[in-house]
Image (cartoon, rainbow, N blue to C red):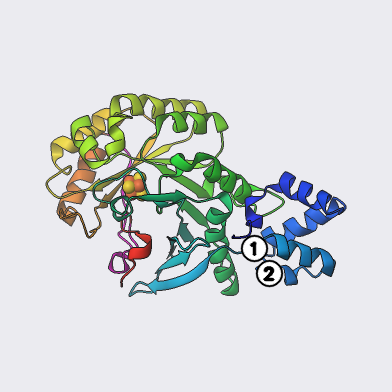
């Protein structure tokens, strides 16, 4: 049987584990520091901890649950997708995107995804299981170590990879808290974004957390019939119920919400669709991110051409809705939004 992952323990649980091993409380701090500020990968690296304790910890726990199965870089070298094998033989992907002044990492929260958005390679593979908080964090730690070796830093983390983070709410939020922990990684909340298709009760719960973490909602259509076709979760959490909950989030937290909108040629990219979207979002503290849909194997429709993307953006702007066009990144290595598919890595 696989050993438990030490990154699944929060500070309190680690403290109790060490107390059971008759260790004084300061050992928890030492271990925490090794795990979260020195980013050790092996218990033998904890030179400030007695050897017999290191030995008993390594008999009980593992530090790194991920094995790099494959790593692919885009032609320009700026996007890197890594396929990680987990201890149980399943796999997930994470994508590092390098920009001039920032390094942004897209991480997964589930193996596969139960939501089944029709255009998404992860959705097309079905749902296998949810990741633990430690398995989510391990993806971040892998890239932090890599960037550290290059004298660089990870600047942004987006929960937008495989899976629906709010269908794995506890592990997702535990990992977020661990990222933000000032005694550890101390990663700024405002540099973290969680993306959801709109799981209403979890957006409400997230609102109550009142964190500075960013929230993005994948909308893709402004009317229920079309959105239900594209994002099946809309049948349970329809737009007319979702939008008021998003509004309540912005009113309670005073934080801007992002809406993701993948433009599909001839499906959701008309001027009427843009006007409907503007009508829906009018007056809300929000921002729309447009991206032309990335290709995925089992979805035959195409992303909108550039001219249509710009026209859609112009209509939103004309209606007073803040909007950006997101660049497609790593499409040739299937590292773009909606292209992650774990074991199906082929390039
Ligand atoms: S787009 Fe996100 S929520 Fe939809 S199937 Fe893909 S991973 Fe799941």
Indicate yes or no whether the magenta region holds residue 113. Answer: no
Which mark, residue 42? 2
> In the image, which residues are magenta?
320-336
Is the distance from the Cβ of mark 1 to the nearest ligand 1 atom less than 8 Å? Answer: no
Most foreground residue, 301 or 282 = 301
Left or right of 255? Residue 300 is left
Left or right of 74? Residue 170 is right
Nearer-N-terminus badge (1/2): 2
Asked whether residue 234 appears in the rendered view, the answer is yes
Q: Which residue is mark 1?
A: 63
Q: How many marks?
A: 2
Most foreground residue, 129 or 177 = 129
Q: Are marks 1 and 2 in contact (CB under 8 Å)?
A: yes
Question: How far from the left and from the top, in percent, is residue 68?
Answer: 49, 70
In the image, residue 176 sits, relative to residue 100, either above or below, namely above
Q: Secondary structure at mark 1?
A: loop
Q: Residue at x 53, y 54 (%)?
A: 136
Q: Residue at x 31, y 58 (%)?
A: 339
Question: How far from the left and from the top, in percent, is residue 286?
Answer: 38, 36
The quarter of the image holding the C terminus is: bottom left
Q: Residues within 10 Å of mark 1 (few under 14, many from 20)?
A: many
Question: How far from the left and from the top, in percent, is residue 215?
Answer: 45, 40
């Amino acid at each position: 049987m696989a050993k438990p992952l030490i990154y699944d323990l929060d500070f309190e649980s680690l403290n109790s584990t060490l107390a059971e091993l008759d260790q004084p409380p300061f050992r928890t701090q030492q271990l925490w520091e090794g795990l979260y500020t020195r980013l050790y990968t092996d218990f033998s690296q904890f030179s400030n901890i007695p050897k017999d304790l290191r030995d008993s910890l390594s008999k009980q726990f593992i530090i790194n649950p991920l094995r790099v199965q494959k790593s692919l870089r885009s032609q320009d070298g700026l996007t890197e997708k890594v396929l990680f094998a987990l201890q149980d033989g399943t796999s997930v992907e994470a994508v590092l995107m390098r920009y001039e002044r920032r390094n942004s990492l897209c991480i997964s929260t589930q193996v596969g995804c139960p939501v089944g958005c029709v255009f998404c390679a992860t959705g097309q593979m079905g749902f296998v299981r949810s990741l633990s908080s430690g398995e989510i964090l391990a993806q971040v730690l892998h890239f932090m170590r890599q960037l550290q070796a290059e004298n660089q830093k990870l600047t942004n983390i987006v929960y937008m990879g495989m899976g629906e983070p709010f269908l794995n709410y506890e592990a997702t939020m535990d990992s977020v808290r661990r990222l933000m922990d000032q005694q550890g990684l101390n990663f700024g909340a405002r540099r973290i974004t969680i993306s959801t298709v709109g799981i209403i009760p979890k957006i409400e719960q997230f609102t109550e957390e009142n964190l500075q973490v960013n929230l993005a909602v994948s909308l893709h259509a402004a009317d229920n019939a079309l959105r239900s076709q594209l994002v099946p979760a809309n049948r349970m959490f329809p737009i007319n119920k979702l939008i008021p909950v998003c509004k309540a989030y912005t009113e309670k937290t005073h934080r801007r919400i992002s809406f993701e909108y993948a433009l599909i040629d001839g499906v959701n990219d008309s001027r009427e669709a843009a006007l409907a979207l503007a009508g829906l979002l009018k007056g809300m503290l929000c921002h729309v991110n447009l991206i032309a849909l990335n290709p995925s194997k089992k979805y035959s429709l195409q992303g909108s051409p550039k001219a249509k993307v710009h026209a859609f953006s112009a209509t939103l702007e004309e209606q007073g809705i803040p909007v950006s066009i997101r660049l497609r990144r790593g499409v040739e290595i299937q590292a773009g939004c909606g292209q992650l598919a774990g074991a199906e890595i082929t390039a």
